[in-house]
Image (tube, rainbow, N blue to C red):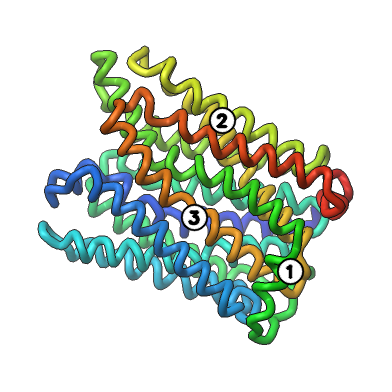
Amino acid sequence: MTTDQRRALIYIAGSQLLALTLWFSASAVAPQLEELWMLSRGQTAGLTLAVQVGFVVGALALAVSNLADTLASRTLFTAAAVIGAGVNLGLLALGEGDFLWALVLRFLTGAALAGVYPAGLKVMAGWFREGRGLALGVLVGALTVGSAGPHLIRGLGFEWRGVVGGASLLALISALLMWTRLEDGPYETARQRFSFKQVGAVVGNRGFRLSTYGYLGHMWELYAMWTWTAAFLAAAAEEAGRSDGFVPTATFFIIAVGGLGAWSFGRWADRYGRTRLAGLSMLISGLAGLATPLVYGRSPVIVVALFLVWGYAVVADSAQFSTMVTETSDHETRGTALALQTALGFLLTLVTIRGVPLLADAWGWQWAFPILAVGPAAGIAAMVALKRSPASAALAGGKG
């Protein structure tokens, strides 16, 4: 890794980390908002679902319009981060009875983040060809820590306004870093002209399809686990007769440890193959989800220990699916392919983010998470198929 690449890695990952604090800035303070705004559990889930829906709409718009390939990636990232920060700040002006407006603002925040995540991936891919799995692993690791950030801010004692305002400030700093401290990398693709044919070319690529099938299995599990970990920990602590004061800080570390998973699996995937490491990650995370009923109501130390393993593995494969897309897609459609893959994945998260609390209401939190293991099982099957396909020759320098 050259000095310029190392510098780019630091600034791109740092920008992504700061911008992604917007994602859970409302979810992290959901208990406070439930009390202040008199929300039901379904409405609380809606605060996260609105972000997911906004992200899907934004990512699909980027894919269909080819903006991810026709606009400079750093420009797209910067503009989206500024818009997201401003929209998120709008939550501070709301009061009781403004839940509909809260949903609108959360939707717009998600739509803005659709310009941050795929653009950040494309900027990073423009700086790395060798070692791209590690580089994108670091980026997803930064995304993971950033997503966990609001839980840490809340755990430090800040009230909901401090959490929301702090996330917006960090997103503005991310835009400043991306715009002023970075240049385009040597492998950045040239900007393309608009064409509806680009989406068809992406979908017709078998390597893209199999990579995305694996990504869908991964996303079935990821955001539902992140969204409802705090609720599970609190319910498990109550069942054990323990205080739940540890929950915000524990939730931060459970989500943030995924940053270490994304970095380490990215490094290993460059060496041993992407399909193999993605499959291993999904195997570990699927087993962890299946094991959650066994620790429910036991000591918080045991519960948190299992969730730390789950948090490490659940996002460790994420960067590899993005890397597979950059390696199997044509250079001219790289941004469109990344936007389309993320749009489909986040669309699927709507099912499990809403479904997990419904299962908790019906069966109790003890049995709410095992259903998530369906995703990793399907994802592993997709990785086996990809490994056996000719497209695997383009992955990790031929390692598959």
Quadrant of res 271: top right
Residue at x 14%, y 44% (from the top left corner): 35
Residue at x 22%, y 46% (from the top left corner): 159
Q: Tell me how far mark 1 sits from mark 2, CA to CA.
A: 37 Å
Q: Residue 377: percent from the left, percent from the top?
A: 61, 35
Residue at x 43%, y 67% (from the top left corner): 111
Q: Residue 141: percent from the left, percent from the top?
A: 58, 46
So how many labels did they put on this image?
3
Q: Nearer the viewer, mark 1 or mark 3?
A: 3
Q: Tell me how far mark 1 sits from mark 3, CA to CA.
A: 28 Å
Q: Is residue 334 left or right of residue 81?
A: right
Residue 154 visible? The answer is yes
Q: Which residue is mark 3?
A: 346
Query: Disc 1 residue type?
Result: Gly
Disc 1: CA contacts within 10 A as few (<14), some (14-19) or many (>=20): some
Query: Disc 2 residue type?
Result: Gly
* Residue situated furthest bottom in the rendering: 193
Q: Is residue 82 left or right of residue 201?
A: left
Disc 3: CA contacts within 10 A as few (<14), some (14-19) or many (>=20): many
Q: Residue 196: percent from the left, percent from the top?
A: 63, 81
Q: Tell me how far mark 2 sits from mark 3, CA to CA.
A: 19 Å
Q: Earlier in the sequence, mark 1 or mark 2?
A: 1
Contact (CB < 8 A) between labels 1 and 2?
Answer: no
Q: Earlier in the sequence, mark 2 or mark 3?
A: 2
Q: Which residue is mark 1?
A: 185
Q: Nearer the viewer, mark 1 or mark 2?
A: 2
Contact (CB < 8 A) between labels 2 and 3?
Answer: no
Q: Which residue is mark 2?
A: 286
Quadrant of res 365: top left
Helix, strand or loop under label 3? helix
Disc 2: CA contacts within 10 A as few (<14), some (14-19) or many (>=20): many
Q: Residue 208: percent from the left, percent from the top?
A: 71, 58
